[in-house]
Image (cartoon, rainbow, N blue to C red):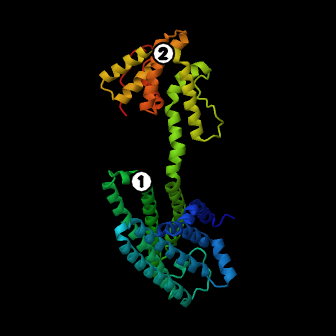
Amino acid sequence: MYEGVNYYVSAAVLGVTFLAKLPALLRRWRSPTVRAVNALLVLPCAGLLLSAPPTIRFVNRVTGIANLSALLVHCTICGIAYACVVLMEYWRGEAHEQARTRRRVRAWSRGYGLVTASIVVLFFLGDRPVERPRDFDTYYATTPFIREMVVLYLLAFVVAGVATVRACWRWAVELSTARRCPDVSRGWGALRTGLLVFVVVSLAGVLFGSFKLVAILARWAGHDWEGLNQGATLLMSLTGVIIGLGFLVAAFGPRLGEHVWRPLLTIIALRHLWRIVCHPVTGAGNSLLLTTPWYSSPEQHLVARITSIHDWMLKLRAYCSDEVRAAAYQQAKDHGEREDRAVAIGLATMLRAATAARARQAGVDDQQSARAAASLRSAEAVYPDIVVRVSRVLPFVPEGEPATATRAPAG
């Protein structure tokens, strides 16, 4: 009932990834790099679909050619190997090395074109009358022409995997040494993800080809190591998922970090300031209530959180003493704190003292509160994220001693 489901799930992941990257392909279809990336999504997707036993039987039945699906799968695997090495050539090619890159790509094209043509010829020269949806390679490992076809496509796949791993490793070493360069460090995360995907996929390809070759050699020696062949097949279906997820992370990871993870982490960082400024007034206890619907984006939640904090800080103005802020700031400087952290500690101490004064209904004179408001505006002009900085040092500002602050750990 569930035959081939692992193939179809992996193919679906790759299909979704391809659709996600399709707009970039349509915008930049002239770019060989973009075309190669999309080929590495489409070809494995097609290979997995064609490798599923139900699809194999369907293709063989519709075409009337025994085991034609095996030929399609083998040609697809050669296409994957070719797309991988071509992408690495274009990816690593420098602007002044474009001519050399084109020559190397043409060489790979001729080589894999010859391999694919040879596979087709050998397939039709060989005798393969029995349909084998799961073990075609090992079942026909001793059949003339078919054995050569199988060994040829496996060697082509292993060669591509070794070449890609070698190129990725060398490039990773070069990037590690050049990471101090601003242009490199800005794109380091995406490059590292891309290289990791290629290393994992290429190693899986090498293991896939090696397992199958060992199983074939065992068959030549009269042994049955079919478990290796089946293990290689399972490995490739899992690799399809890795390819899809890896490209999704590389494509959308920076966007998720900017619009999802960073706002969420900022909301978490604001929890200390939110508790002391808003909760004693709102009566919300220890829960962290949001003023936006739960289905709003993290950025909308963050805007609402910061707006609420600013609104309640305005209501605290009548209880804020600039003398408390100045004393805490100076003490922090005397302890060797950096200027930005000393400013944050001063404001945090002032706000903690203000919430305590609000609870006692003990306001300060208008002159003190006006100077405190001016100090806050000045700090916001220099440090736009001052509310986050204040929230982070609040746990190190002791209660009951509003004019002093402990030394907050650097970070």
Q: Quadrant of the N terminus?
A: bottom right
Which tag, 1 or 2, sits closer to the chain's start? Answer: 1
Dividing the picture into quarters, in which one does residue 283 lie? top right
Secondary structure type for disc 2: helix
Tally of marks? 2
Secondary structure type for disc 1: loop
Q: Nearer the viewer, residue 40 or 154?
A: 40
- Tell me which amino acid carries mark 1: Gly
Indicate the position of residue 135 as horizontal and vertical percent values: 56, 75
Q: Badge 1: how crowded within 10 Å, few (<14), some, or many (20+)? A: few
Disc 1: which residue: 187
Left or right, 179 with respect to 389, comes to left
Q: Quadrant of the C terminus?
A: top left
Judge whether 269 appears above or below 248 on screen.
above
- Tell me which amino acid carries mark 2: Ser
* Residue appearing at x 51%, y 14% in the figure: 319
Disc 2: which residue: 369
Measure the C-alpha gap from mark 1 to mark 2.
46 Å
Indicate the position of residue 145 as horizontal and vertical percent values: 50, 88
* Residue appearing at x 40%, y 79% in the figure: 107
Judge whether 273 appears above or below 164 on screen.
above
Dividing the picture into quarters, in which one does residue 308 lie? top right
